[in-house]
Every structure is written in C-alpha cells, then in structure tokens.
Image (spheres, rainbow, N blue to C red):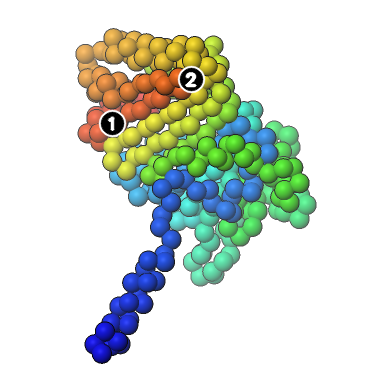
Amino acid sequence: MGFLSPRFLAFAAASILAGCRPQPSPTIVLDPALAPLIPHDTTILAGIRIDQLKKTELYARLRSEGKLKPLADFERETGIDLEKRVFDILIASNSKTAVALVRVQFVTEGTAGVEPPLGKPGTPRFSYKGYTLAGEDSEKGFSATYFNRSVIVAGPTPMVKGAIDSRDGSKGGPPKALLERVKTIPSSNQVWAVSFAGIATALPTEIPGPLGGLRGMPIDIRSIVGAVDVSKGVKASAEIVSGDEKNATKLNDAVKGIIGIGRLSTPDSAPELLKFYDAIQVTRERDTVRVSADVPMTVVEQLLAAMSERKLI
C-alpha cells in the first residue's frame, strides 16, 4: 500500500500540476491587453520587452551611463518609472507618425492600485470621451492617458485620440498579416520589429556609417522582420522580403558592398569595428535576404568604449 501513501499521492499531484503548467512560448506573443489597441493602419510594429531587457548586463550598463535616450525620453515625457512600472512597450506606426502602447503595473507605495500622475509636473490636462489626457490638446501636441488600469497610450495627440476612438474595434483592429509575422520571431529577443513599409521608411535615420546607405537604395521591399537579443553579447537578425529575385540580388549585393566599404574605411585605431563587420553574415534565398550578426560581449564592450571616447553615443 506504500504507493497509496499520503507522501506518494502528494508527489503525484505535484507532478501532474507541474505538467499542466503552460510552457513559455518559443515565439513572441503580443500582450492581450495591448494587441487590440494596435491601429488598423499600422505598417510598422516594434516591441521592447522591458521586463526581459532590464535583466541583461548590456541594459544595466547603458542605462547607468545614460545612453538609452529613447527610453529616457519616454520616462521624462510620461513620468512613468521604467524600472518599477513597465513590462512591455509596443510602438505602432503608419509610416508617418507613431503611438506607444505601454503595459504597466501599479502598486504604489502606501496605496495599492492608485495610478501615478502622467507627465512632468505642471503638465496640462484635458478630457476626451471620458478619458483624462496629460499633454497638449492640438494636432501637433503630445499626450498620454491611462486606457485602463494597466495600459498607457502615449504619442501625438491625434494618435492617442484615435486609439480611444477605435477601442471598440469599429475600425477593423490590427492588421492580421502584421500579427502573423510577429509570431515568427523567437521569444529570446528583447527588441523586435515588423514592417510592411519600404526600407527607407522602416529603417531609423540614425544608422551610423556605411550601413546608413541602406535607406537610399531604390529596391522594392515588401516586408522586414528584425530582432535583437542582448542577453549574451548582441545577436541581431533581419529577414527582408523583396518583390522578386532580381530585387533580392540587388539588395544582397548592396548590403555586402556596404559592409565591405565599412571594413575598408575602418581606421587602424578602431579594430573593434572590424570585428563588428566580420560578425555580419548576409545570405539570399530566392526573393529573401537574411542578415545576421553575433557579436560577443567583449567586442560590444570595446565598441561602446570606443564610441564613447569619440563621443558618438
């Protein structure tokens, strides 16, 4: 009867319950509190998994050195402490303007469940359809509001109002094709982006050096999926789907050419840049070009030190 002993039954129950627990998803899963708020005309969707990112050594270093300007700007504009409050940030753009959808937790000191005020001290407030917005009520203004007790919507005031207008799904909801591409991104990445816009619109204007030339290439680009994992060094990947094999070949050759130019123009005093360029791999398969880079933390540290000395960051 030993197999029916209380100790055995407790062990069996614990084993069954453990087996029933949902396993972490191998790919990115959008927060169900944020996904319905993605505007219907979104062409670029990016995610910053703050809860995962802040566990990394690279994040801690860059934040302590004040080198995370976009996040610092967000924190200053909204008044929300990224370290204590924010889980996830989605940035949705229609290629002209963008809105941030932020998943937050509110357990304030002394009073549980009370939302801290949005905006800097003295930020004006105004009402829109039952919501209180902090910011400027104008076409060119910036504002933020609590969409509910766990979600903040922030961005240009017209975009924030648009999110409120479409809260019932009457405008069609987020683009399904965009969401399907998000499902292809491994969940090991802390930063990711999906774009159905052209390459000139999708890539940031701040890309330094020869790689910045990618934005000016007259190549038909249908979609871009990119992701970055900084848990150990920097692992980056991008899948770029062009209109056809001819365009893909042009893109493949152009990217390799830009990397080659970067290597040739690297001064002897910056050997860390050579290691960075050497870490980039480019391959083409039919109409798709894949770019990947696996940069060890030692090289990342050398790059950061060199960039800091040259006052590039």
- The tally of labels here is 2
Q: Secondary structure at mark 2?
A: loop
Tell whether 270 sits left or right of 64. left
Quick check: 155 left or right of 70?
A: right
Q: Secondary structure at mark 1?
A: strand
Q: Percent position (x, y) of residue 228?
A: 39, 36
Amino acid type at circle 2 is Asp
Label 2: which residue? 287
Tag 1 near tag 2, CB within 8 Å:
no
> Mark 1 or 2 closer to N-term?
2
Cα separation between marks 1 and 2: 27 Å
Residue 305: % across, % down: 27, 30
Residue nearest the observer in this picture, 65 or 21? 21
Q: Give above or below for 163 relative to 195.
A: below
Residue placed furthest toward the right: 129
Looking at the image, residue 24 sits to the left or right of residue 80; the answer is: left
* Three-letter residue code for mark 1: Val
Between residues 8 and 112, which one lies in front from this camera angle?
8
Q: Is residue 294 visible?
A: yes
- In the image, what residue occupies the spot 37% across and 32% down? 236
Q: Position of residue 208 (x, y in %)?
A: 41, 20
Above or below, 99 against 210 in this view is below
Spot the residue most to the bottom: 1
The structure residue drawn at horizontal position 39% and vertical position 31%, both measured from the top left corner, is 237
Please tell me how crowded label 2 is: few (under 14), some (14-19), or many (20+) other residues with Cα within 10 Å: some
Q: Residue sitting at 56 percent across and 23 percent down? A: 222
Any part of residue 73 in sight: no
Whole-percent x, y for residue 145 in the image: 65, 50
Quarter of the figure with residue 139: top right
- The residue that disc 1 covers is 295
